[in-house]
Image (cartoon, rainbow, N blue to C red):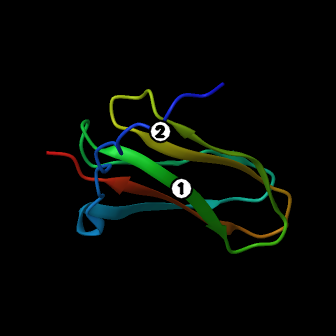
Amino acid sequence: VPGPVGPPGQAGAVLDRSRTYRVETSVVVEPATFSGPAAACEDTNDVLLSGGYELTLREMEVIRSLPFPFFAQQTWTVQVFNAGLIPGELRVYAYCYRVD
């Protein structure tokens, strides 16, 4: 049988949205080649929140898109293969939270 309900706990920390920022890098991927650029947070203390990518060519195949939070600077990386006949651009971005 459960006991009585205890007192409420302390409120959790509130994230300050003004401390979030986006880092972006882009590369041109030639036909029939792989590329795997990464976007890294600006400081070793900053926290990676999420990341992603944008492609300019439908024929570019995404092999993987994932975080690497254990690097000195937390990083989002994307690996692609350009299966097309022309170069295409890959933009990789990371959303980070600035910690002092």
Picture coordinates of residue 73, whole percent (x, y): 34, 36
Q: Which residue is mark 2?
A: 5
Residue 83: assigned label = none
Q: Which residue is mark 1?
A: 51
CA gap between label 1 and label 2 equals 40 Å
The quadrant of the rendering that contains the N terminus is top right
The three-letter code of the residue at mark 1 reads Gly
Picture coordinates of residue 47, whole percent (x, y): 35, 44
Q: Horizontal placement of 60 versus 30: left or right?
A: right
Q: Quadrant of residue 57?
A: bottom right
Which residue is rendered at x = 43% and y = 62% of the image?
24
Which residue is rendered at x = 32% and y = 64% of the image?
21
Q: Earlier in the sequence, mark 1 or mark 2?
A: 2
Q: In the displayed image of the protein, which residue is found farthest to the left? A: 100
Which residue is rendered at x = 61% and y = 62% of the image?
53
Picture coordinates of residue 81, whole percent (x, y): 77, 51
Q: Looking at the image, which is closer to me, 59 or 50?
A: 50
Q: Horizontal placement of 97 versus 26: left or right?
A: left
The quadrant of the rendering that contains the C terminus is top left
Q: Quadrant of residue 82?
A: bottom right
Secondary structure under badge 2?
Answer: loop
Q: Looking at the image, which is closer to me, 10 or 74?
A: 10
Secondary structure under badge 1?
Answer: strand
Label 1: few (<14), some (14–19) or many (≥20) C-alpha neighbours in 10 Å: many
Q: Are marks 1 and 2 in contact (CB under 8 Å)?
A: no
Tally of numbered discs: 2
The three-letter code of the residue at mark 2 reads Val
Picture coordinates of residue 59, whole percent (x, y): 85, 66
Label 2: few (<14), some (14–19) or many (≥20) C-alpha neighbours in 10 Å: few
Q: Horizontal placement of 68 versus 98: left or right?
A: right
